[in-house]
Image: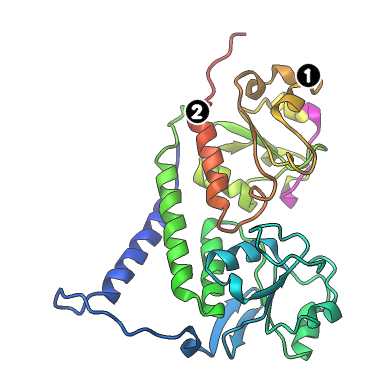
Amino acid sequence: MHRPRGPLIALVLALSLAASACGDDGAGEQTAEPARSPDAAFPVTVEDANGPVTIDARPGRIISLSPTATEMLFAIDAGGQVTAVDDQSDYPPEAPTTDLSGYEPNVEAIAGYEPDLVVISGDPGELVSSLDALGVVTLTLPAVETLDGTYEQIAVLGKATGNEQESVALIDQMSTEVASLIQRIPVFESPPTYYHELDDTYYTVTSDTFVGFVYGGLAGMENIADEAKGASGGYPQLSAEFIVDADPDYIFLADTVCCGQTAETVADRPGWDGLSAVRSGSVIEVDDSIASRWGPRVVDFFRVVVDALAVTAPVPMPG
């Protein structure tokens, strides 16, 4: 089974070399660098989805309208700089959740918090231009397709908030954990197939999405939805008949919170009790938010996938 590890291992090595270079004076002696205030790094220019963005001073009143960005900010110790987050940002628990919306943003409500930086995953209208007119800097960090994209966004937020060292440490930790998890994946004669359920009406993902990358690009699994009608959009709606005919080796339920789905409810669906995944105990329940965001907890999501492969590897079933 193909397991692409090059970029991850390369990143770990690069980070290690960078750390060594910072602590080596060329003669083999360790030298301590003087403490430096994060404010000394500003102004800084970072790249977001729309191009270069300049931040004049270390932001202290950040608004996040992206649940993924919220998780990234707190993971790099920028939580103390966050004033408000949107109504979908439910993690970490200490995040200052409000009724602000990232889907239907209210510029006046956002401005009421007097932010000096607003982080979004997409602009549903004229949000960026409206905030720009008010002198508020906006960073647009949309959904990514690979883990490298996650690392890049963490690095951007680290530099933008004055927490660059913390962001490098987080990337190092994540990449090391992912590389370790990859080593635990069993070797299969052929790639195991899977179905990832977004809701109980059978919406799913294809391999072209970030979630699909975790299954395919990291775990080497094969997605039954890639050949389905509507697959080109990345999020097709399958039929029960399609899923039963495909008979996936694994079923991952990312609708345990929204729709109350469990291994038991899946087994009770008409015709599903004979599926290989059901019969082998390979119906895996996943927290909805962990399986839908490309932030630091992607490691937790990947661990669920690896644990499923390691513990419930499919075995031939009697005919």
> Is residue 191 in view?
no
**Percent x, y of residue 76:** 52, 68
Residue 233 within the segment the image draws in magenta: yes
Q: Amino acid at mark 2?
A: Val
Q: Is residue 267 above or below residue 261?
A: above
Q: How is the image coloured?
A: rainbow
**Percent x, y of residue 9:** 38, 55
Q: Which residues are magenta?
A: 232-241
300, 237: nearer the viewer: 300
Q: In terms of sequence position, does the residue under pointer 1 or pointer 2 come before the other?
A: 1
Q: CA distance from mark 1 to mark 2?
A: 25 Å
Compared across the picture, whether 157 is left or right of 206 comes to left
Res 150 label: none
Q: Amino acid at mark 1?
A: Gly
Q: Quadrant of residue 37?
A: bottom left
Res 271 label: 1
Q: Residue at x 32, y 64 (%)?
A: 16
Residue to which mark 2 is pinned: 311
Q: Quadrant of residue 258?
A: top right
